[in-house]
Image: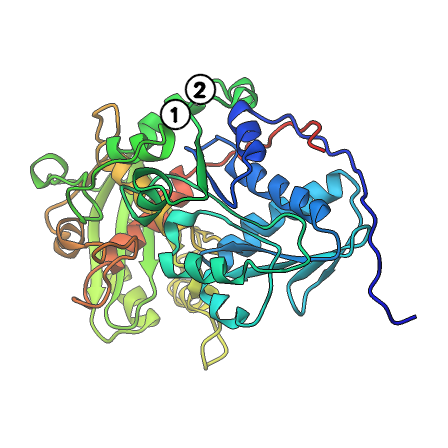
């Protein structure tokens, strides 16, 4: 009575048709191991399957699954992990209050944490940890988790991660260039995922038309590139994409907003046979949503037969007045008799990396095609394309050096993502793992 439970070894079969690179990753015996691969290489599947393996190898012990942001953790990493458990009828209990999963047939626990929460783990002993999209995390978070990997009762101590290349950053140096003792890595090749290609044969051809050359080589081919500039919209060329544009009254107007108070920014565009024409921008300092609506109606009210509105998901949050930005827009347009209006606003904003990659791909894709043009009157958008930079040695955009920057390009990015972002979710056929 009162003693620790004696967990016995339990065998369980899991359906998982692993790709060659995934198999090599699972077979690595190193204390710290990584899986580097392009889009479609099965990184998330490898991460979650490895976590399940380690749960069974360490009955009664605790491990951690982490991601750089809460949205990524909740909407991607955790969803993929729980889906595997449910598909294979592995019994578990999810405790929402602590964001913890208990595997009931082994007594093992998995805690889900963002890498900003790693500091809270002081004093915690882990048997294993696994991290998603490591190249978008800081090296300090990885080092802190290394220090938590010290459960004396663990049968197999292991820290592992999956990622898409992002230049020759700290991950590249630690795992590949100057590999530390006790580290091993698998580099998954492009086009290996036969399940994906069987489902969507033109998957990579479509990405080549969507992504600019640098993003295509990094995300689709999985190459480690020497970044020679921290310019965010590196595919923009003033002489190529800026030209006089005219409104086509036969097409709907597209209005995209970024709900920043100072300045409040938006762009007005049209899409003609897949080509994006940015006709104008509305940038007003210290403004309100209703004031921006009034300015839009002043410029375009007489030519707005059909209107589609896009924007920042934060516009769905209620203000102190009890209304949301989108409710204010509906009210203003309704009072003005503008009724043929539709809204294309996501529940949450897309990942910044993916949104920017798509915009760069429309500016100049990997096939050398341009499908995004900007009228010269859009001065703030052109400045964004020219001047927005990443912070040094970081994937974070510099939003502090000039408070006017990033907002107009963000608004345009929301529109492009909603109209032309990826729509397919590619599932992976599964087979046996253990």
Can residue 300 be seen here? The reply is no
Look at the numbered discs 2 and 1 and tell me whether their residues touch, using CB distance below 8 Å: yes
Residue lying furthest bottom in this view? 320
Can residue 142 be seen here? The reply is yes
Quadrant (top left, top right, bottom left, bottom right) of the C terminus:
top right
Residue picked out by circle 1: 206
Q: Where is residue 229 shown, x and y percent of the image?
A: 15, 45
65 w.r.t. 229: above or below:
below
* Left or right of 238, for residue 222: right
Q: Where is residue 356 shown, x and y percent of the image?
A: 30, 46
Q: Quadrant of residue 276?
A: top left
* Left or right of 127, for residue 218: left
Please rate how many residues cluster around mark 1, counting C-alpha atoms within 10 Å: few if below 14, some from 14 to 19, many from 20: few
Disc 2 to disc 1, C-alpha distance = 6 Å
Q: Quadrant of residue 371?
A: top left
Residue picked out by circle 2: 202
């Amino acid at each position: 009575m009162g003693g620790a439970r004696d967990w016995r070894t339990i065998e369980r079969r899991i359906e998982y048709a692993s790709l060659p690179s995934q198999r090599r990753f699972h077979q690595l015996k190193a204390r710290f191991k990584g899986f580097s691969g392009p889009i479609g290489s099965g990184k998330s599947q490898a991460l979650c399957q490895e976590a399940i393996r380690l749960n069974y190898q360490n009955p009664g012990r605790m491990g951690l699954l982490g991601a750089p942001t809460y949205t990524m953790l909740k909407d991607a990493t955790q969803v993929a992990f729980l889906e595997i458990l449910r598909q294979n009828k592995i019994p578990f209990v999810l405790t929402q209050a602590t964001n913890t999963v208990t595997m009931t047939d082994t007594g093992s626990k998995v805690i889900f944490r963002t890498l900003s929460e790693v500091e809270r783990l002081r004093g915690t002993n882990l048997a294993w940890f696994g991290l998603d999209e490591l190249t978008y995390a800081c090296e300090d978070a990885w080092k802190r988790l290394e220090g938590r990997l010290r459960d004396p009762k663990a049968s197999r101590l292991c820290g592992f991660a999956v990622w898409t290349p992002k230049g020759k950053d700290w991950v590249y140096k630690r795992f590949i260039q100057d590999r530390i003792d006790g580290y091993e890595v698998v580099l998954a090749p492009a086009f290996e995922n036969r399940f994906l290609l069987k489902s969507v044969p033109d998957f990579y051809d479509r990405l080549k038309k969507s992504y600019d050359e640098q993003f295509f080589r990094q995300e689709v081919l999985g190459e480690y590139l020497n970044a020679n500039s921290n310019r965010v919209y590196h595919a923009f060329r003033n002489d190529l994409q800026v030209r006089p544009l005219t409104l086509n009254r036969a097409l709907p107007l597209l209005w995209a907003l970024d709900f920043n108070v100072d300045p409040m920014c938006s762009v007005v565009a049209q899409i003609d046979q897949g080509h994006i024409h940015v006709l104008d921008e509305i940038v007003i300092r210290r403004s309100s949503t209703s004031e921006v609506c009034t300015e839009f109606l002043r410029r375009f009210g007489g030519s707005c037969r059909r209107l589609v509105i896009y924007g920042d998901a934060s516009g769905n949050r209620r203000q102190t007045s009890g209304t949301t930005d989108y409710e204010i827009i509906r009210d203003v347009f309704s009072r003005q008799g503008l009724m043929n209006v539709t809204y294309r606003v996501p529940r949450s904003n897309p990942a910044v990396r993916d949104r920017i990659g798509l915009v760069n791909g429309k500016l100049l894709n990997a096939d050398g095609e341009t499908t995004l043009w900007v009228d010269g009157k859009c001065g703030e958008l052109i400045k964004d394309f020219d001047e927005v930079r990443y912070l040094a040695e970081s994937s974070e955009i510099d939003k502090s050096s000039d408070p006017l920057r990033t907002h107009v390009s963000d608004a345009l990015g929301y529109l492009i993502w909603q109209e032309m972002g990826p729509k397919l979710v590619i599932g992976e056929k599964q087979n046996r793992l253990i």
